[in-house]
Image (cartoon, rainbow, N blue to C red):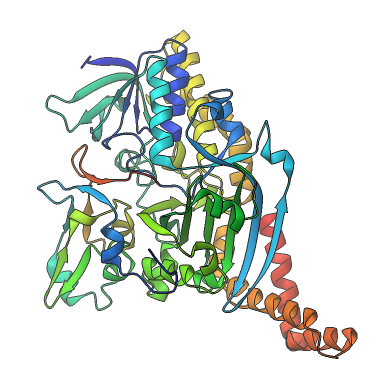
Amino acid sequence: MAEKFDVIVVGAGPAGTACAYTLAKQGVSVLLLERGEYPGSKNVMGGVLYRKMMEDVIPGFYKEAPVERPIVEQRFMMLDKESATTFSYKGMEWGKEPYNNFTVLRAKFDQWFADKAVEQGALLINETVALECIVKDGKVVGVRTDRPEGDIYADVVVLADGVNSLLAKSLGFHKEFKPDEVALAVMEVLKLDKKVIEDRFNLEGDQGCTIEIFGDSTKGILGTAWLYTNKDSLNIGVGTMLSGLIKHKLKPYELLEYVKTHPMIRPYIQGTEQQEYLAHLIPEGGYRSMPKIVGDGVLVVGDAAQMVNAIHREGSNMAMTSGVIAAETIIEAQSTGDFSEKSLDVYRQRLMDSFVGEDLKKYKDATHHFEKYPHYFEQYIPMINRAASQMFTVDGTSKREKQRKIWQGIGTVGDKIKIARDLFQAWRVMK
Amino acid sequence: MSDGTKGQSIEEKQYLIRFKADTNSHLHVLDYDTCATKCPDKICTIFCPAEVYKWEDIRMHVGYEGCHECGSCRIGCPHENIKWEYPKGGHGIIFRLG
């Protein structure tokens, strides 16, 4: 093992690998450390990978990468106990180049991506935990690994060590996260015949469909469930704020079973065979939970920097963009040899000026708002379902009379004012 | 095959996963007395997605071998009573798909 590299990247997920790939392609000597048996072996994602940010790293990647299906339809289901109101967008433009997004299985995809970084010249070392950053005179100069004589040095260390980011915490970049800053997601991969998937989800050929499920899927607490189509399997999962599970004393795997056996969901997964069960945290604290992301000789990227847009289920795309900007910043800093916090702060500025910073700022209050006021999920989704049922049930009542009953069913004048206020507040945090 | 109607236990789910357990635990309860005397809810036994934490009469049992390394216990323990590390490199959970 060489003792000194230009850059050490800790963690071979989307952020770390995008960073290592970009650096290696420019001839920078880069060590990519991965604690798992192989890249992806510790990683979990609902499954949607966005094409644009991945193509910024490897143009045309989908022609050879292990992607599952290009998504042509995105459904949003508002679930009550025995009913659902569903919105959907389906468009053929998503089924052809340039594509919008793909489902992926991370253990497969991350391995492929890391191999690509290796092809560019990055050195990938698996099965190695970075225990701590080596700090000298207040500057990060390397990492201490759990290998014998495992100290490795570099001009810059990039922390891409995921949601738990023990390294950023040990540097004092963030305090321990709170249960209302992380969502706990549990998921199963269910094997199902390719043809059955296509029939069941109204798809042709390799097209894919995603369904986001709100409301009763999390028993009214803040979170979502999802059902995504892979080539010959489905991903079904549910994620809720850890604080919600604690408050309601819910077991996450029992909630997943509840979703799987729900009458609106059950038919989709009938006849499937379980292949894997997975759990992972999602950093959902948003802009307000972001740690310090630049220090002397160190940058923080991806989940480790809490870059997730929970409202739009985006994360891996932000991770990749942050990895690329980090790499570009380091390459520019090499021309002066100045890797101080001041010099590397270009990373933070560019990141916050990009869509990553813009979107995190846009939704900075959204998660907190919906966490604080659970009735959006508890009350309004059942209300929408009741209204739809009443309006579309033909029973001899006139439409005007139906409208009157729906309006009455909403409650008193006070209740209606409260709803109007809630809608305004929701618009305010989302606008 | 699942008929999609019957609930499945956590033991059955855990059976689907490949683990390469380290000989030493990467999870440490700092003070077992705190669990026994100050923590009536023992909420970690509820929210842990792999039921790693089990209350056995008088003592918290930590089945670290089945841990998904998600970090929830470290963050969710109301008494900050869990020391949480990564398992040794190459050990712990090994996802094949997800």
A170 or A356, which is in the foreground?
Answer: A356
Residue B26: x %, y % from top left: 18, 50
Residue pictured at 29% horizontal, 57% vertical: B74
Is residue A300 in sight in this rendering?
no
Q: Is residue A152 above or below residue A182?
A: above
- Report the quarter where the N terminus of chain A lies: top left
Q: Answer with the quarter of the image where residue A82 lies.
A: bottom right
Q: Is residue A244 above or below residue A5?
A: below
Is residue B75 in sight in this rendering?
yes
Residue A375: x %, y % from top left: 60, 75
Residue A332: x %, y % from top left: 50, 14
Residue pictured at 49% horizontal, 30% vertical: A65
Q: Is residue B40 above or below residue A238?
A: below
A76 or A69, which is in the foreground?
Answer: A69
- Report the quarter where the C terminus of chain A lies: bottom right
Residue pictured at 28% horizontal, 38% vertical: A36
